[in-house]
Image (cartoon, helix red, strand yellow):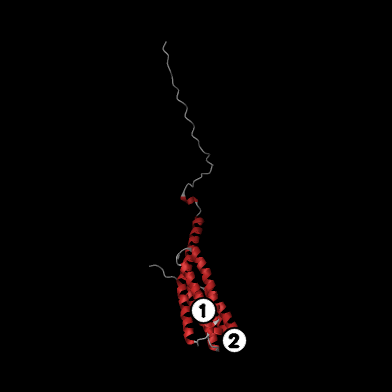
Amino acid sequence: MVARLRVTPAPEAPESRLPESAPSSAPSSPFAVPAHAYLARLASLHDEAAETAHLANLLGRAPWIAGFLGAASIAVGLVAPWTTALAVWLGLMAIGIGAIGHNYAKAIAAPFDRNALRTFARNFSACLIYAGAAWSAGLFLAVPASLAGAIAFPALAAAVLAYVLKARDLAFSFLVPATLMGAFCVLMQNGNTAAASGIVAAGLVVAGATLLFERLLQAAPRPQAG
């Protein structure tokens, strides 16, 4: 008798199939993500870029502000009679100008870092508040009392800064303390209510012109790349 060995092949394992209704972990196509998510992200990137550009422009204008305040202070020092009060006022202005320069030097190391630029903008606003108050203190410490001079001294400086800055908030950071300090100094010096009222009126005119100038800049059409 001859023995025969038969080898039976093992049955193939059934394929594991997911139910057709089971959700897939990976998107079947790139269109599975809603389009509004891409649009929202694009809008967010545009806002971030616009904010960074605005803050970077303010950073670039800071040296001009410091230069203008320094030149104006020197001009007043050359014209006004030399007194101890004038020296004190020049020292106050030097502190404000130095603070602007120090803030600029810290921010220029990272000119496109949004966090650094935001910190610069806050510090710059504080520097302008101090500079506005210190500038109009010159009506008590440096500039001889006169109606026209008392009105023009804070108003002209605020108008120049508003034109250079082209930013309403920062312009008001200088304008408001300059107007209030100027009116206060005139009243404390000689009780001239007419000059104090004129300073406040001139401050309101400069504030209105600043708002109008900002709206005109926003409404101006941007040049298109040809």
Look at label 2 and name its amino acid.
Gln
The residue that appears at 54% across and 78% down in the rendered structure is 134
Residue that mark 2 sits on: 189
| Residue 167 image position (x, y, % from top left) | 50, 73
Please tell me the numbered disc located at residue 104.
none
Disc nearest the viewer among 1 and 2 = 1
* Three-letter residue code for mark 1: Gly
Q: Are marks 1 and 2 in contact (CB under 8 Å)?
A: no
Question: Is residue 93 visible from the viewing direction of this image?
Answer: yes
Work out whether residue 219 or residue 95 is closer to the camera in this orientation and state it: 95
Instruction: Say which of 67 and 200 sits in front.
Output: 67
**Looking at the image, which residue is at 58% across and 83% down?**
185
What is the x, y in percent for residue 153? Answer: 52, 84
Q: Which residue is mark 1?
A: 91
The count of marks equals 2
Residue 1 vertical position relative to residue 146 in the rendered view, above or below: above
Secondary structure under tag 2 reads helix
Which comes before the other along the chain, label 1 or label 2? 1
